[in-house]
Image (tube, rainbow, N blue to C red):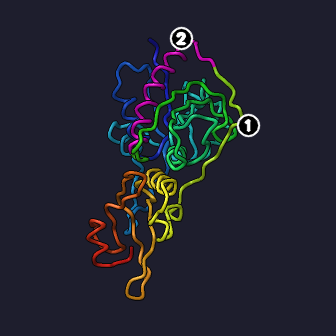
Amino acid sequence: MKKLSLAYFGTPDFSARFLEKILNDKGLPVEVRFIVTQEDKPVGRNQIITPAEVKLIAQKYALPVKTGFVSGLYDIDLALLFAYGKIISKDFLKAPKYGFWNIHPSLLPKYRGASPVAAPLTRGDKETGVTIIQMDKEMDHGPIIAQKRVKILPNERRDELTNRLTKLAFGLFKRTIGDLIRNQIRTQVQDDKNATYTKLLTKKDGYVKRGELKTKSQEEAEKLFNKFRGLYPWPGLWTTIRFKNRDLRLKIVDVELVGGRLIIKRVKLEGKREVDFNQFNKIYRVF
């Protein structure tokens, strides 16, 4: 079977895992020619300049890495994008023979935008999925090439769901590449009337008032539990407490939902180590 030449666009850890799956699958009829990712950025409290996870995989396999302006797109068959994090200029979208495909971890047109894995969790959805689209000039708007649904597990958190969707996406991509080679691709236009949009998560999204953590109804407990799942591990669920005339950030590290009640299990106070919540509350008596 003929191999398609591929340019891969991606940035975070789960995109890196997807890329490595492509590189290690000898039966997949693609040849990755080069990688496009974001520039090295300062990370953490000490702002250490750190390369993107996708770049590390590219270096591991001695693949060319590009940032910014991309040359070479006119010489490849397909550009594949999975969580790249930047807008592709419309002038480039038709440069590869088969254009750009985008792997989006939601059931498009639902949850277009930057946080498609967090949104169904925070909203208490029972299912989600993966969609491959042919990219056009609008965000997450192009025709659907392939789509796969999956149930959301009752206690699943965003990192766990992301891992599962990444595996699902690879299987879907592998099948769809075969369809492309056999000239069996059939696309479906998205129904814009059903489109919903998500925004980029910020630290503020995880804030809850301290009083809200003492939920009184099952509905409130479930809503807060879903918010915790969707925002885990970052920005996470957090509040502030007043201690010795200082406002300190308190991160809710672990919770569970038992009998319609939200049980806080572990917390981390600003500048302190993670501890059992009951132990914490005996000392600080804030709940």
Q: Secondary structure at mark 2?
A: loop
Provide residue 5's location: percent of width, then percent of height. Answer: 49, 25
Say the numbered circle drawn on residue 182. Answer: 2
Looking at the rendered structure, the kind of residue marked 1 is Lys
Residue 91 colored magenta? no
Query: At x 42% / y 88%, what residue is drawn?
Result: 245
Crowd band around label 1 with a 10 angstrom C-alpha radius: few (<14), some (14–19), many (20+): few
Locate residue 78, reporting x and y percent.
55, 27
* Residue 161 counted in the magenta span: yes
| Residue 225 position (above or below residue 139) | below
Q: Relative to 62, is 117 on the left or the right?
A: right
- Quarter where residue 281 is shown: bottom left
* Residue 150 at x, y percent in the picture: 47, 31
The reply to whether callout 2 and callout 1 are in contact (CB within 8 Å) is no
Q: Is residue 33 above or below residue 263?
A: above
| Residue shown at 43% from the left, 25% from the top | 171
Q: The residue tagged with tag 1: helix, strand or loop?
A: helix
Task: Give the main secondary structure, helix, strand or loop, of the magenta stretch.
Answer: helix
**273 or 61: nearer the viewer:** 273
Q: Which is more N-terminal, label 1 or label 2? A: 2
**What range of the chain is rendered magenta?**
160-186
Q: Nearer the viewer, residue 56 or 283?
A: 283
Q: CA distance from mark 2 to mark 1?
A: 33 Å
Residue drawn where x is 33% and y is 68% of the image: 268
Image check: 231 left or right of 186? Answer: left
Residue 9, x across and y down, in percent: 51, 39
Name the amino acid, label 2.
Arg
Say which quadrant the N terminus sits in.
top left
Q: Which mark is residue 193?
A: 1
